[in-house]
């Protein structure tokens, strides 16, 4: 229609043959009539109309004319498709009148048609569109306003000319406005910010931001708002910005990292510094903030400028006040371990309501800093300007999508690229439930998609005037509704005036209304017809692509394909238009799955989650395949396409046309069948377009570049990494408008200029299209590399998104591209620095995520897996192309403060010869426990009371917290002498006090002389006219004038005297009314802030006004001396208006946190064992490293230790591994920060200890040592500023060491046998932390409830912050529901959240209630008063095990008891989850894994946890016992295990190591896409050296047959759910003999022995059990129950895990070996503590000693008599001494009147009086070794081992078993490997011939697995080396020549094992390598697993 063309012509803004951003599919027409020129094109109008939103199916407003030439070859077919009416061309002549110009050189054979791009917006958006013209960003690569600029036709029926005028006026107005803004910016360029759009963005809360001046104001309803330069991350270099304080209120100024938004909750007061991801300074309250607040810095005032500096290279944060730093007490606030951002940081400030602050960011062309930054520091604004350039670099690759334009305006509001890569938007998709069970993810995909889907998603909106109800006659209803709206518009129109009072005027009014209605319907009809034309045109192009298939090429649209090289612009235009057709027809915009919703949907599908494909929210508006005929009314619906038969009838040409064009009917039918897919909302047309598009990208470079640019643009827009507009300015402070958002996706909306939000699914499809094999094989290598490199760079931009699901998609895609083309990494990082920075910190980011997801181990989220895949690809590319690392630095892994640092990061910095480490990484890193792993020492550190007088408390801290404290005494302030003026050395009157006194007395005399002579002299204390009292103290010394001034009139005393006043008083009052000159006060002016004795900021340089003298005076120095005070005076300096209180001194602050008071802290020292330790020479000390855990401070300290030959240990503290470095250490160091360098030298004590036992027979040594620390910044006020020294005494306990030589009778004990480790001392109870109702035993292992005073709680002496720990508690006496067993935080401890800034250490906390999380013995869990059914009923005699996994945050319980008469071992499962001391530093983490279904340990249940609540200072969890019934008694068992656990960095490194090994199998498979300088042959060569070393160690370990891996009770019910308490048991005879000696067995039990078990945990079993001896760990003998003589067999639920015996179970008759045993019945000498050498036992208890029949004291133990008081039992009658299961020392004695029985050493309970006293031995010391020979288990095992070897020699070969064993050992000798070089050669020759490495190792691994399956008592880990070697040897021997010597050994193996091996490898027997090589390869595979 002519009007449609006219409208579209007005929208054109280019003189080129085609309009900008237009869509150009091709449809031919017959030649036009003669009067119509064959070619025409649009003329440039005055201005471009604003961009509008586009729709695919119908056109309701404006249209743009597009034309494309048609190839002559396809012309006949398309001519036959549509035969238009000639009348259509009649309106073409009228185009010239509408601004169209004809092309004179047109070809008559060419034809043009209209392709109309539909646009639609609601009427209420019209005014917004005019505003959009002002905000258009002309430098946007896609033109933004130029991209697809179809014009808007007025939907209400206004004339086209009026619409043109409106658009022109809007454009002209926008130009004027833009010019005014430019002039304004030019005049204010150096006043505020002008480098880009406002860089200060909302982080949380509500506030007002002035984008020009960067002044921020908190709103009344904004909470504790936070703003910052979010998105511009500073990852390296030195940076600086300033904050000008407009209101000196509650503000926190500093830095935040990228994850800060997750921690920030403005509604609860969270701001910068309130979490682990931010660091801030608060000058209002004088705090520095990093998760917790510590006193620091100076107080600011209004107008001050705070300088914020960060050095990302040396990792320090500093603050200055008005340009001054350390000299005034500012300077470095955070450093080293105290400043650990997870990635980069950005400037961030937080403020309270109505507070104001202004930021100065610096940068070229912006406001300069108030104070120059430190040398080498750059302004933060410079980084923002660099980000602007980064964006321009990225957009260069997308400029092919933009049509050329002459007018390129550089808008001053430049956008920049943001980095939101640590955002957690959309984390709900990764919930742990989804990892196990798929579910519908639609609920997580955000808000309704109707706003994204264009017209198809528009929902009917009713006007306020109402819409008539739906009429049965739809046409009538539609017209009625339209008429009502038109009449309403006519009434409100100011240009139309009607007098409705007359009939005629009303008729005219109706006529005008109907005329407008007809015009509106007419225009809409035209638009609908044009919409149909658009629809068919697009679909014809799509069908052409489908029909052509592999023959399709964009060159088909050219008149002459040979002109392609000469007409680049035309090919690019065609490619752009073709892409726009594809985007319109193939994307999911009609169904709403585009933009953010589409990206989330793609991620959900990748996660295996279901989503709803269609949104039925508007189903009531129109059925499927139909749409409403009007925007406002839905009564009339029409078909909207998608119906096959509509197009099928039009597309089929005549048969002669098909024959002429060589088109097969199959192609036509195929295209017609694709119609339903093309028209559906599901976008099913992509599968039909694939072949044609593949050929198109190969044949046309322009189209390939367009598609590539479209992919890059879509990824960028979906990532939403740009702020598209300024933040909202809110002028009304009382407004409730929400001016902020916590969602980065809402801040960075997709460009408004895009007609459609990008389709993530289409983008992914096109990426796969460009990467597919069909394309890559047809492109040259250089094009492939360029294509993949550009694709990789584009998808890397998506890694910066705040949406974690979209980052997951981008990570997987980028990793896949990088695997195909490793050279892409170099390309991307060299061009775009923000990508290089991202990859520099990628390892840090992944490590943090791995740690955050530790609760769900071993099933991590798909997001975490995708990040690891990407990191692995980067590492792989760096190995192949080392040059890529030049553009980004990969230092050691850095994690945030809520993630513990690995010990390995420190070990790698040290030389291995100085710090020898374990041979196995599993042992040293904490994955598996082993004797070579760690040695545990427990104890305490007593911090002695400091010799000083504790300063008095100051009220100033309370005032400061309320914002009312004293201001900073700065330059220019007035001071007077203070309370300590006279305490100075050489104190004098330099302040002029004597002059003041003299002048004051003179004036007083003058005043008195004027009084009536009859009056008496002025009495003392009478006030003078100058406002200073004359009162003197009792000593006759005048009081300080400032004190007088404060006590002088408050001006309220100057009232008219009453009638009772004396004449003198009246006279004096009347005289005071005269204005007499007062005496000037002796004031001084502060010149500068000075240091005092090396402490900055505690002194002031003052010039005194009366004398002019200068001096430096203490203002808090020397322990809190104040020589001066801060005052305010009147203008005449004669009266003091205000006297400020002295600030709190550093000494007062430290005392408030407990400094100076004595206290005891429990510690745990973990020493990494050295293999050389036990065999070191006598003159050599050994160095090792360890972790000193301070649970009271919630920290773990890395220590260097020296093990001295005399048994002493030197411990040097180095750095903080986990915990807060900068808060909570006042009690120890006198300052908040940790001070490295403390040295403890602890030595064994000679005196006996009473901590664990009551005599010298203790199995543990005590080590005692001390350290003193000279506090740097505190002074003793009493001695005039002397230094303070803190003395600490460390007391640790460890197992006794061997006391005799290891060489007996010429037999030298092998060093591997000498590596037995000792058990850790048992957990005891803390005598300083228990309720008054609970009493402790002497050994502190047993607690008893004495009164019923509430629910008493007692704490253990060992606390845990990190790792996995298991301990057992025995219930001696217990009522149902009266015993609580669990963990809790210590109240008042510096660790955790319970610490407060008060004198909390002075009083004992109340412990009369159950604290923490625990299990109550009536089948319930209990926490904070809430109970939940769990577990089983526990009674007296039962044992409860507690498994605390601090890393995963789980608490589980294990039950060892009797139920219905049967012995039950039962894992009760997880009781609590989400109780990790570290918290979980990522949203959505903390649940799942082995803890699924358990209640959350935080308040509020599973949903009560605030997001991302990682803890900088982790809380410590202590074992606790709660008792409430008198008589209840509980004992802490000696059985416990502990492991340091595994940190996130170690887990990540392990995953990367596996990937590196796997890369060995890739070879040069992708050599095509590698850079030429990479040596592909070398990259395919060998295994990593470190892995060969690991494999060599595994080979030797496996061959030694010494180690056996097993799970324990501490492993939990699920494998791999936690790490640390699985053990590698030592199976050597020596180690087992030592373990047996430790529990007092008469003979040694060796691995493989079967034992009858009659005792368990102090209980005599009614039914015997059979156990298999496994091996030893920490000197304890482990076993596994294999059968129970009962029908139920119920113990097998928990009995299958290994556990160990103690000495109470090894009492005579408790354990009995079945058969002869492998120890050859060699006697094992008993330790001296089991048969002590004494002079006898004397009964000292008045009541005598009760003799019982059993070691245990329970109802089944018979009382057989009593030994009277005073009886002495001779040594010969003392049979044995043992500890029972409750830790009671018992003696087995023979007393003739009673017989043999057991007596106790002490009374059980109460005061525990002695029953027996040990008499000294009568020996004269002739044999000093007699008491020491068997002091330790190693001593006994040494003697046993000598006899054991002798027994073997004596037996000789008479024993067939020994003969076979001898042959077996001889056979194994042939498999010895002397060094790693030989092992490397074996690995190289271990590959099966005619197989590659992957195939060979697969066959070997399969054969090994099948062998392990059939061998008895074996699995893949425990399979015997000798058995495998024999099977491989048998397999490699020819069938005709069997080795007779090996036949006996072959018979020892089950024949089934030979059969399965033959089935696996016999067909390759001729190609098998040697058995030795095969075993080396198997060892390598074992090492990998």
Image: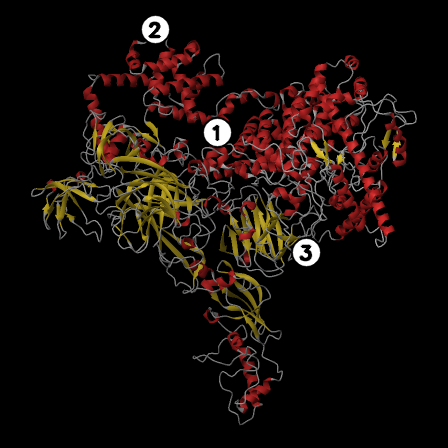
Of the numbered discs in the image, which one, if any, rests on residue 731? 3
Q: Along the polypeptide, which appears first: circle 1 or circle 2? A: 1
Q: Distance between the residues labelled 3 and 2?
A: 99 Å
Of the numbered discs in the image, which one, if any, rests on residue 1075? none
Q: How many labels does the image show?
A: 3
Q: What element carries label 1?
A: helix
Q: Along the polypeptide, which appears first: circle 1 or circle 3? A: 3
Mark 3 surroundings within 10 Å by alpha-carbon count, few (fewer than 14), some (14 through 19), many (20 or more): few
Regarding residue 1871, the answer to whether it shows in the image is no
Question: Residue 765 location, x and y as percent?
Answer: 64, 27
Q: What element carries label 3?
A: loop
Question: Residue 305 location, x and y as percent?
Answer: 62, 57
Q: Is residue 1673 above or below residue 1112?
A: above
Report the residue that reaches farthest toward the left. Answer: 1793
Of 1038 and 514, the residue lying toward us: 514
Q: Which of marks 3 and 2 is in front?
A: 3
Q: Distance between the residues labelled 1 and 3?
A: 57 Å
1052 on left or right of 54:
left
Question: Residue 1666 location, x and y as percent?
Answer: 25, 29
| Residue 640, image quadrant | top right
Mark 2 surroundings within 10 Å by alpha-carbon count, few (fewer than 14), some (14 through 19), many (20 or more): few
| Residue 1607, image quadrant | top left
Q: What element carries label 2?
A: loop
Q: Is residue 1351 above or below residue 1540?
A: below
Question: Residue 755 location, x and y as percent?
Answer: 72, 36
State the quadrant of the C terminus: top left
Q: Are marks 1 and 3 in contact (CB under 8 Å)?
A: no
| Residue corresponding to mark 1 | 1553
State the quadrant of the N terminus: top right
| Residue corresponding to mark 2 | 1937
Q: Distance between the residues labelled 1 and 2?
A: 43 Å
């Amino acid at each position: 229609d002519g009007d449609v063309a006219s409208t579209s012509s007005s929208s054109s803004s280019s003189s080129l043959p085609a309009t900008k951003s237009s869509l150009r599919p091709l449809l031919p027409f017959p030649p036009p009539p003669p009067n119509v020129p064959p070619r025409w094109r649009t003329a440039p109008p005055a201005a471009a109309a604003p961009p509008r939103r586009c729709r695919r199916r119908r056109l309701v407003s404006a249209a743009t004319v597009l034309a494309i030439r048609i190839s002559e070859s396809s012309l006949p077919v398309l001519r036959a498709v549509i035969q238009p009416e000639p009348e259509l061309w009649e309106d073409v002549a009228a185009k010239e009148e509408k601004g169209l110009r004809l092309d004179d050189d047109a070809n008559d054979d060419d034809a043009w048609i209209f392709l109309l791009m539909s646009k639609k917006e609601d009427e209420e958006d019209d005014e917004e569109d005019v505003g959009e013209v002002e905000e258009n960003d002309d430098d946007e690569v896609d033109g933004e306003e130029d991209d697809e600029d179809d014009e808007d036709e007025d939907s209400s029926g206004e004339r086209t000319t009026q619409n043109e005028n409106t658009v022109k006026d809007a454009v002209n107005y926008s130009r004027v406005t833009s010019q005014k803004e430019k002039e304004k910016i030019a005049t204010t360029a150096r006043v505020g910010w002008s480098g880009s759009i406002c860089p200060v963005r909302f982080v949380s809360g509500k506030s007002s931001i002035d984008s020009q001046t960067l002044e921020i104001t908190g709103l009344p309803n904004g909470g504790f708002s936070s703003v910052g330069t979010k998105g511009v991350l500073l990852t390296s270099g030195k940076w600086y910005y300033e904050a000008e304080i407009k209101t000196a209120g509650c503000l926190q100024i500093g830095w935040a990292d990228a994850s800060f938004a997750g921690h920030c909750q403005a509604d609860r007061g969270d701001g910068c510094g309130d979490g682990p991801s931010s660091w801030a300074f608060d000058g209002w309250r004088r705090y520095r903030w990093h998760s917790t607040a510590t006193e620091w810095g100076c107080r600011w005032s209004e107008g001050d400028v705070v300088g914020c500096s960060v050095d990302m290279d040396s990792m320090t944060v500093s603050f200055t006040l008005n340009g001054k730093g350390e000299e005034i007490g500012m300077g470095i606030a955070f450093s080293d371990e105290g400043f650990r951002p997870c990635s980069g940081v950005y400037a961030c400030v937080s403020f309270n309501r109505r507070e104001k602050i202004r930021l100065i960011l610096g940068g070229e062309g912006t406001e300069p800093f108030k104070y120059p930054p430190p040398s080498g520091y750059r302004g933060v604004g410079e980084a923002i300007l660099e980000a602007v350039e980064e964006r321009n670099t990225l957009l260069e690759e997308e400029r092919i999508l933009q049509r050329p334009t002459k007018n390129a305006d550089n808008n001053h509001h430049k956008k920049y690229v943001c980095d939101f890569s640590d955002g957690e938007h959309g984390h709900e998709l990764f919930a742990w439930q989804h990892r196990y069970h798929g579910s519908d993810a639609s609920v997580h995909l955000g808000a309704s998609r109707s706003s994204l889907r264009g017209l198809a998603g528009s929902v009917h909106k009713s006007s306020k005037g109402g819409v008539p109800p739906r009429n049965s006659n739809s046409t009538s209803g539609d017209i009625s509704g339209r008429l009502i709206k038109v009449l309403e518009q006519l009434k409100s129109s100011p240009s139309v005036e009607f007098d409705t009072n007359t009939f005629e005027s009303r008729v005219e009014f109706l006529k005008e209304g109907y005329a407008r209605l007809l015009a509106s319907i007419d225009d809409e009809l035209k638009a609908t017809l044009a919409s149909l034309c658009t629809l068919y045109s697009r679909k014809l192009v799509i069908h052409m692509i489908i029909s052509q298939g592999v023959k399709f090429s964009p060159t088909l649209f050219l008149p002459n394909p040979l002109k392609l090289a000469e007409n680049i612009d035309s090919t690019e235009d065609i490619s752009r238009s073709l892409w726009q057709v594809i985007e319109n027809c193939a994307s999911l915009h009609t169904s709403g799955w585009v933009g953010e919703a589409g990206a989330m949907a793609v991620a959900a599908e990748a996660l295996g989650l279901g989503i709803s494909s269609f949104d039925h929210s508007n189903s009531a508006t129109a059925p499927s395949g139909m749409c409403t005929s009007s925007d406002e009314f839905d009564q009339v619906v029409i078909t909207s396409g998608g119906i096959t038969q509509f197009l099928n009838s039009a597309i089929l040409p005549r048969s002669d046309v098909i024959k002429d064009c060589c088109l097969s009917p199959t192609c036509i039918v195929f295209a017609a069948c694709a119609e339903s897919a093309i028209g559906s909302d599901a976008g099913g047309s992509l599968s039909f377009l694939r072949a044609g598009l593949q050929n198109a990208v190969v044949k046309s470079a322009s189209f390939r570049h367009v598609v590539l640019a479209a992919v890059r643009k879509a990824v960028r827009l979906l990532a939403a990494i740009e702020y598209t507009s300024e933040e909202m300015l809110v002028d009304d402070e009382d407004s409730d408008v929400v001016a902020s958002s916590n969602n980065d996706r809402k801040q960075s909306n997709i460009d408004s200029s895009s007609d459609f939000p990008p389709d993530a699914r289409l983008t992914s499809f096109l990426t796969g299209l460009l990467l597919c094999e069909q394309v890559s094989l047809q492109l040259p290598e250089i094009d492939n590399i360029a294509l993949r490199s550009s694709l990789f760079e584009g998808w890397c931009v998506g890694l910066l998104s705040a949406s974690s699901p979209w980052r997951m998609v981008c990570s997987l895609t980028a990793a896949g591209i990088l695997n195909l083309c490793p050279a892409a990494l170099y390309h991307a990082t060299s061009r775009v620095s923000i990508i290089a920075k991202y990859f520099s910190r990628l390892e840090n980011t992944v490590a943090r995520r791995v740690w955050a997801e530790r609760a769900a181990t071993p099933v991590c989220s798909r997001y975490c897996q995708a990040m690891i895949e990407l990191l692995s690809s980067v590492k792989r590319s760096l190995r192949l192309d080392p040059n890529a690392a030049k553009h980004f630095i990969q230092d050691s892994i850095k994690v945030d403060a809520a993630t513990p640092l690995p010990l390995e990061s420190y070990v790698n910095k040290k030389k291995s010869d100085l710090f020898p480490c374990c041979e196995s990484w599993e042992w040293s890193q904490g994955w598996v426990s082993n004797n070579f792993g760690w040695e545990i020492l427990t104890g305490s550190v007593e911090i002695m009371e400091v010799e000083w007088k504790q300063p008095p408390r100051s009220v100033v801290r309370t005032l400061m917290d309320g914002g009312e404290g004293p201001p900073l005494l700065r330059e220019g302030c007035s001071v007077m002498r203070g309370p300590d003026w006279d305490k100075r050395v050489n104190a004098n009157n330099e302040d002029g006090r004597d002059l003041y006194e003299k002048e004051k007395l003179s004036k007083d005399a003058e005043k008195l002389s004027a009084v009536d002579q009859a009056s008496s002299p002025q009495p003392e204390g009478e006030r003078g006219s100058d406002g200073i009292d004359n009162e003197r103290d009792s000593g006759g010394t005048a009081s300080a004038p400032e004190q007088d001034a404060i006590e002088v009139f408050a001006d309220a005393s100057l009232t008219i005297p009453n009638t009772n006043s004396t004449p003198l008083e009246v006279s004096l009052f009347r005289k005071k009314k005269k204005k007499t000159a007062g005496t000037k006060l002796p004031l001084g002016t502060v010149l500068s802030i000075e240091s005092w004795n090396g402490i900055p900021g505690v002194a002031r340089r003052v010039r005194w006004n009366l004398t002019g003298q200068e001096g430096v005076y203490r203002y808090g120095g020397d322990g809190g001396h104040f020589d001066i005070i801060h005052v305010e005076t009147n203008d005449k300096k004669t009266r003091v208006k205000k006297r400020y209180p002295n600030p709190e001194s550093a000494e007062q602050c430290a005392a408030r946190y407990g400094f100076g008071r004595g206290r005891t802290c429990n510690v745990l020292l973990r020493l990494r064992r050295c293999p050389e330790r036990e065999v070191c020479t006598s003159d050599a000390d050994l160095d090792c490293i360890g972790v000193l855990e301070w649970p009271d401070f919630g920290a773990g300290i890395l220590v260097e230790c020296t093990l001295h030959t005399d048994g002493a240990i030197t411990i040097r503290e180095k750095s903080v591994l986990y915990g807060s470095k900068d808060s909570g250490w006042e009690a120890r160091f006198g300052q908040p920060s940790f001070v490295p360098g403390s040295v403890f030298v602890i030595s064994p004590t000679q005196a006996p200890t009473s901590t664990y036992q009551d005599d010298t027979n203790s199995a543990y040594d005590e080590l005692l040592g001390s350290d003193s620390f000279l506090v740097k910044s505190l002074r003793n006020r009493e001695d005039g500023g002397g230094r303070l020294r803190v003395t600490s005494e460390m007391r640790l306990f460890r197992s006794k060491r061997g006391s005799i030589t290891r060489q007996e009778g010429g037999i030298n004990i092998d060093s591997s046998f000498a590596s037995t480790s000792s058990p850790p001392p048992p957990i005891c109870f803390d005598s300083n932390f228990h309720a008054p109702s609970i009493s402790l035993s002497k050994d502190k292992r047993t607690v008893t409830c004495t009164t019923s005073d509430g629910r008493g709680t007692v704490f253990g002496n060992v606390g845990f912050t990190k790792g996995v720990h298991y301990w057992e508690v025995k219930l001696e006496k217990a009522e149902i529901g009266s015993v609580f067993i669990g963990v809790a935080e210590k109240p008042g401890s510096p660790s955790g959240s319970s610490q407060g800034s008060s004198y909390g250490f002075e009083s004992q906390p109340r412990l009369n209630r159950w604290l923490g999380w625990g299990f109550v013995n009536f089948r319930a869990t209990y926490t904070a008063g809430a109970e939940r059914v769990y577990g089983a009923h526990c009674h007296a005699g039962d044992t409860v095990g507690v498994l605390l996994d601090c890393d995963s945050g789980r608490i589980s319980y294990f039950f060892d008891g009797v139920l219905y008469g049967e012995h039950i071992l039962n894992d009760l499962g997880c009781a609590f989850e989400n109780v990790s001391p570290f918290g979980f530093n990522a949203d959505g983490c903390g649940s799942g894994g082995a803890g699924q279904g358990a209640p959350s340990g935080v308040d509020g249940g599973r949903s009560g946890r605030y997001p991302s609540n990682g803890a900088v200072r982790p809380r410590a969890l202590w074992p606790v016992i709660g008792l409430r019934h008198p008589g209840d008694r509980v004992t802490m068992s000696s059985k416990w295990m502990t492991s340091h656990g595994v940190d996130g960095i170690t887990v990540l490194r392990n995953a990367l190591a596996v990937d590196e090994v796997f890369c060995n199998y890739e070879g040069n498979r992708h050599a095509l896409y590698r850079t030429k300088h990479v040596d592909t042959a070398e990259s395919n060569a060998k295994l990593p050296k470190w892995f060969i070393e690991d494999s060599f160690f595994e080979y030797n370990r496996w061959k030694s047959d010494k180690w056996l891996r097993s799970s324990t009770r501490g492993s939990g019910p699920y494998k791999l759910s936690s790490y640390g308490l699985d053990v590698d048991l030592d199976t050597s005879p020596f180690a087992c003999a030592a373990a047996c000696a430790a529990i007092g067995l008469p003979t040694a039990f060796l691995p493989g022995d079967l034992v009858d078990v009659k005792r368990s945990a102090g209980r005599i079993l009614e039914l015997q059990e059979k156990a298999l001896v496994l091996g030893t760990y920490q000197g304890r003998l482990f076993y596994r129950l294999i059968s129970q003589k009962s029908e139920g067999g119920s113990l097998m639920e928990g009995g299958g895990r290994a556990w160990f015996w103690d000495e109470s179970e090894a009492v005579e008759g408790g354990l009995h070996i079945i058969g002869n045993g492998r120890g050859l019945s060699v006697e094992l000498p008993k330790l001296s503590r089991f048969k002590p050498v004494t002079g006898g036992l004397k009964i000292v208890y008045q009541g005598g000693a009760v003799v019982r029949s059993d070691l245990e004291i329970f109802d089944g133990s018979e009382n057989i008599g009593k030994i009277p008081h005073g009886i002495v039992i001779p040594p010969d009658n003392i049979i044995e001494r043992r500890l029972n299961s409750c830790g009671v020392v018992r003696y087995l004695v023979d007393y003739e009147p009673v017989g043999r029985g057991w007596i106790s050493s002490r009374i059980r309970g109460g005061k525990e009086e002695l029953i027996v006293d040990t008499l000294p031995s009568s020996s004269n010391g002739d044999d000093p070794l007699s008491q020491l020979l068997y002091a330790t288990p190693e001593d006994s095992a040494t003697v046993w081992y000598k006899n054991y070897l002798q027994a073997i020699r004596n037996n000789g070969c008479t024993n067939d078993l020994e003969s076979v064993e001898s042959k077996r050992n001889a056979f194994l000798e042939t498999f010895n490997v002397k060094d790693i070089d030989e092992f490397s050669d074996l690995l190289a020759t271990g590959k099966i011939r005619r197989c590659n490495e992957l195939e060979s190792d697969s066959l070997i691994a399969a054969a090994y697995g099948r062998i392990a399956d059939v061998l008895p008592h074996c699995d893949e880990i425990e399979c015997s080396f000798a058995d495998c070697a024999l099977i491989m040897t048998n397999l490699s021997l020819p069938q005709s020549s069997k080795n007779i010597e090996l036949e006996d050994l072959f018979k020892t193996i089950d024949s089934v094992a030979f059969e399965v091996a033959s089935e696996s490898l016999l067909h390759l027997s001729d190609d098998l390598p040697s058995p030795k090589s095969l075993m080396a390869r198997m060892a390598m595979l074992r090492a990998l697993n």
